[in-house]
Amino acid sequence: MSINAVSVAEVTSPAARARRFRGSPKLWIGLGIVGFFVLLGVIGPLFTEEPNAISDAGLTGPSAGHWLGTTQSGQDVLAQLIAGTHGSLEIGLIIGVLATVLSILVGVTGGYLGGRVDESFSLFTNVVLVIPGLPLVIIVTDYIEDRGVVTVALTITITSWAASARVLRAQTLSLRERDYVRAARASGERTWRIILVEILPNLLPVIASQFIFAIIFGILSEAGLSFLGLGGTDHLSWGVMLHFSWTAQALALGAWWWFVPPGLAIAVFGAGLSLINFSFDEVINPRLRTKGVRA
């Protein structure tokens, strides 16, 4: 059979999507990277010492006793990196869930209902989009005294949901005109059931992609805030490690083992999530699917 004979239905069917996922090296590499950091953040703290424990071995390089060296106060960098992994993943997951749920509520609900509801939600989304995100988060966190994990996550979520809501609204406007959705409305199905059963399942690849992007945005935003000294005060994260290494002049002192591991962890984990996101994009984007079939 020629390439032109491959129908769009064959490429876009659930079975074809599953085959593309299974045969995507980007997906497996990304899952391997993310899985490693998840295990490191969940299981790692059980096998390491107290990350804030102070010792006499201040600012020593990697050795058998301290695989990644120590900080200026003698704290083990590896223990701090593992604890920081748990903190960064926790706040990234919270932001990802909150931003995704909010974008679904605004984008999908407004796009399906239309009318004044859609106009109001679109206006609110556009207002949030034009507000500079990082300056707003810096101002809000600067006025908050108790900056816990949930507080920082809620603050970052304020500026991380609007773009996803716009994407979901556009997809919903297209899906609401499909024949099966019209048939469900004509048969008297309730609005909430049409959205949950007919609309959302067809948006799952887009929602998953937006969820992954929200996690990346959340981790990077928290790292930036923590580096500026505006992050959480009750947890350790990669950004907090970078902040303390910077204030202690680790770069000037040549203590590379203090600031390189958290910076490298942010870069590698972000790359892993990006690879997973690219594999989702290949399933969502028809042009990429067509290129894959031709290849």
Image (cartoon, rainbow, N blue to C red):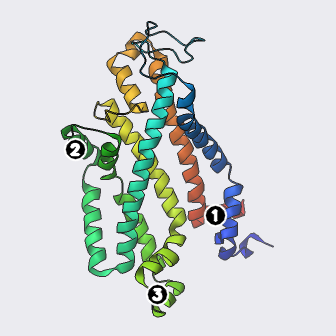
Q: Quadrant of residue 144?
A: top left
Amino acid at circle 3: Glu
Q: Earlier in the sequence, mark 2 or mark 3?
A: 2
Q: Which mark is residue 289?
A: 1
Classify residue 88 as left or right of residue 106.
right
Q: Earlier in the sequence, mark 2 or mark 1?
A: 2
The residue carrying mark 2 is 140
Classify residue 73 as left or right of residue 142.
right
Residue at 41% of width from left, 82% of height from top? 191
Residue 216, given in percent of the width and then of the height, sits at 45, 45
Q: Is residue 128 above or below residue 4?
A: above
Q: Residue furthest right?
A: 1
Secondary structure beneath dot 3 equals loop
Amino acid at circle 2: Val
Q: Which mark is residue 189?
A: 3
Q: Is residue 80 above or below residue 71?
A: below
